[in-house]
Image (spheres, rainbow, N blue to C red):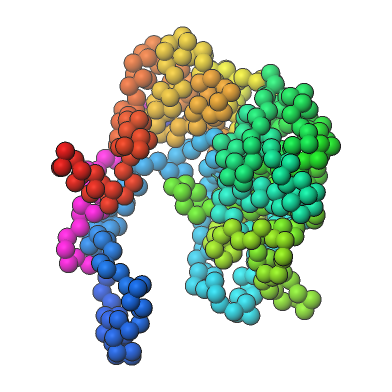
């Protein structure tokens, strides 16, 4: 194997003693030199006060840091150097599809005709943008095997909520059994957002256990499905990375009971161009454009979770719908009396839609399929090699192929050396690899969820495997080295309790000042 050297004595994250940007603030410092807006306004309308109704005026200006442009640039560049990113190294964070986002997508999204468009502009002046949205809807319909798609939801979880509300509306308007059908069936391997979305839409969550192979237990499903079932939310490929073998039977059980089938398509990256949820009998599906269709994600930034539905549910989708008129022009249709309404301001996260459009356009039918094939190959390559490293195993259907990701267990490693999945994750940071997702799904003890995506080359995958081999060797020879990791990152072990506890978690400068004041009083 020819791999990049992994030697933690050579890998060092930059370390800056960087204060908060508010602490850098100097009264009177500015980062721009523009003609005074106030002067301009005074010249045209007399006074600023007359422009803004009194009740809408701020009592005090917002407390923003006063800082120069160069200070801002340095501040954020330093912070970025103390962070890990997909443009620095392998980022196999399972269930997140941290693929590389080609720069050409950014170029497309930054084109001035798109970037400076106003959402309230007359549709006659935004025809190209509406056409882009309309075409993207068509493409996503075709890719998922659905009849209609809404681009409005801003994330996967938001798509789930939208889809579940559509299901509820169906039971309200079509079956008339909205009150009676108050249960949503959700397998125990599901992403936490599934039960959360169902609960937000007012459903009781009924958990369906997995069987020994890691698939939905169809006997348990049969006994749970009935006259109270509104539907089933299924993730496929599932969280273990396996393709549900009994998909037809599962669908039959739920449909026969009068429920609808919801497909969590966040793991779509493994199956684009191979199989379609619509052909598997599903009624509703959401996709994560910020996972599968290569748009940046992370840090809670803008995402997009379009929802596709079969024809009989199309009338319930959010308004406005983008429509193509007979003369070939495009319009926005608000006139859908049974729609669930709006789920997002305007038309969704438009910039994200553009990036996905550019990505799909660039890859085309064959390219999309190829990307999925490579993602699956990479996940299986990692699963095969990592599960043969001492201390690691591949629980559930060891010999079944994985799809987008593989979930390995460090249970043996922990039993034999005391080194837990958490320690492995921390040690990998020293070796220039972002940690996989850990302790998820809950059904795998000491889980390490590895999703390499199609972006990584064989050299990079070999380096990742070699890093895991090294951590295993160390665990047996020098466990202390692993349990005290990370050693070469800008920050050592974080206090995860303090970082998550409502009493200590400080989310804003204002909260920080309030806390300080409180402490001063005590
Ligand atoms: C990521 C993910 C989600 C949630 O998507 P967000 O965009 O983070 O809200 C839901 N289900 C599965 C299976 C996922 O992997």
Give the number of marks. 0
Residue at horizontal 64 percent and vertical 75 percent from the top: 127
In depth, the one of 271 and 446 nearer the eye is 446
Residue 189, horizontal then vertical, whole percent: 62, 29
Residue 203, horizontal then vertical, whole percent: 64, 41
Task: Tell me if residue 448 can be seen.
Answer: no
Residue at horizontal 32 percent and vertical 30 percent from the top: 495
In depth, the one of 213 and 318 nearer the eye is 318
In depth, the one of 417 and 2 nearer the eye is 417
In depth, the one of 240 and 331 nearer the eye is 331
Ligand 1 image position (quadrant): top right
Q: Is residue 352 above or below residue 372?
A: below
Q: Is residue 234 above or below residue 349?
A: above
Task: Tell me if residue 202 can be seen.
Answer: yes
The quarter of the image holding the C terminus is: top left
- Which residue extends farthest top? 416
Q: Is residue 339 left or right of residue 448?
A: right
Residue at horizontal 20 percent and vertical 52 percent from the top: 23
- Which residue extends farthest front? 179
Quarter location, residue 125: bottom right
In magenta, the rendered stretch is 6-30
What secondary structure prevails in the magenta region?
loop
Quarter location, residue 485: top left
Q: Is residue 240 magenta?
A: no
Q: Is residue 489 above or below residue 420?
A: below
Residue 46, horizontal then vertical, whole percent: 29, 89
């Amino acid at each position: 194997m020819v791999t990049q050297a992994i030697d933690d004595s050579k890998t060092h994250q930059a370390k800056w003693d960087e204060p908060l940007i508010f602490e850098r603030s100097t009264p009177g410092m500015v980062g721009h030199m523009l003609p005074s807006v106030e002067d301009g306004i005074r010249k045209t309308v007399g006074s600023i006060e007359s422009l803004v109704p009194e009740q809408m005026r701020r009592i005090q200006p917002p407390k923003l840091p006063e800082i120069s442009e160069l200070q801002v640039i340095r501040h954020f560049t330093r912070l970025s150097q103390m962070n890990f990113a997909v443009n620095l190294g392998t980022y196999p964070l399972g269930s997140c599809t941290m693929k590389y986002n080609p720069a050409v997508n950014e170029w497309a999204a930054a084109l001035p005709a798109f970037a400076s468009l106003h959402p309230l502009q007359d549709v006659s002046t935004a025809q190209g943008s509406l056409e882009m949205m309309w075409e993207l809807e068509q493409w996503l319909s075709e890719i998922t095997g659905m009849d209609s798609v809404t681009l409005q939801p801003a994330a996967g979880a938001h798509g789930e909520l939208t889809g579940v509300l559509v299901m509820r509306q169906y039971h309200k308007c079509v079956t008339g059994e909205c009150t009676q059908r108050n249960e949503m069936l959700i397998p125990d391997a599901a992403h936490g957002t599934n039960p959360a979305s169902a609960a937000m839409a007012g459903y009781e969550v009924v958990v369906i256990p997995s069987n020994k192979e890691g698939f939905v237990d169809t006997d348990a499903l049969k006994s749970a499905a009935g006259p109270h079932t509104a539907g089933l939310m299924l993730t496929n490929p599932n969280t273990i990375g396996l393709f549900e073998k009994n998909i037809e039977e599962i669908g039959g059980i739920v449909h026969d009971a009068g429920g609808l089938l919801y497909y969590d398509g966040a793991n779509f990256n493994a199956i684009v161009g191979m199989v379609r949820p619509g052909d598997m009998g599903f009624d509703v599906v959401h996709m994560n454009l910020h996972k599968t269709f290569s748009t940046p994600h992370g840090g809670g930034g803008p995402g997009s979770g379009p929802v596709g539905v079969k024809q009989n549910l199309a009338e319930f989708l959010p308004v406005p719908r983008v429509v193509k008129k007979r003369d070939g022009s495009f319009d926005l249709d608000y006139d859908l009396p049974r729609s669930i309404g709006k789920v997002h301001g305007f038309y969704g996260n438009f910039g994200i839609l553009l990036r996905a459009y550019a990505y799909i356009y660039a890859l085309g039918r064959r390219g999309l399929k190829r990307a999925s094939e490579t993602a699956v190959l990479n996940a299986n390559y990692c699963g095969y090699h990592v599960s043969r490293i001492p201390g690691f195993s591949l629980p559930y259907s060891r010999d079944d192929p994985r799809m987008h990701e593989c979930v390995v267990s460090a249970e043996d490693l922990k039993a034999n050396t005391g080194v837990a999945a958490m320690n492995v994750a921390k040690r990998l940071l020293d070796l220039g690899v972002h940690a996989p997702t850990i302790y998820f799904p809950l059904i795998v003890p000491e889980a390490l969820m590895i999703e390499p995506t199609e972006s990584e080359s064989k050299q990079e995958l070999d380096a990742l495997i070699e890093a895991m081999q090294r951590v295993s060797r160390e665990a047996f020879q020098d466990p202390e080295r692993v349990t005290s990791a990370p050693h070469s990152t800008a920050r050592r072990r974080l206090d995860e309790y303090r970082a998550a506890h409502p009493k200590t978690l400080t989310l804003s400068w204002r909260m920080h000042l309030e806390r300080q004041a409180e402490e001063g009083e005590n």
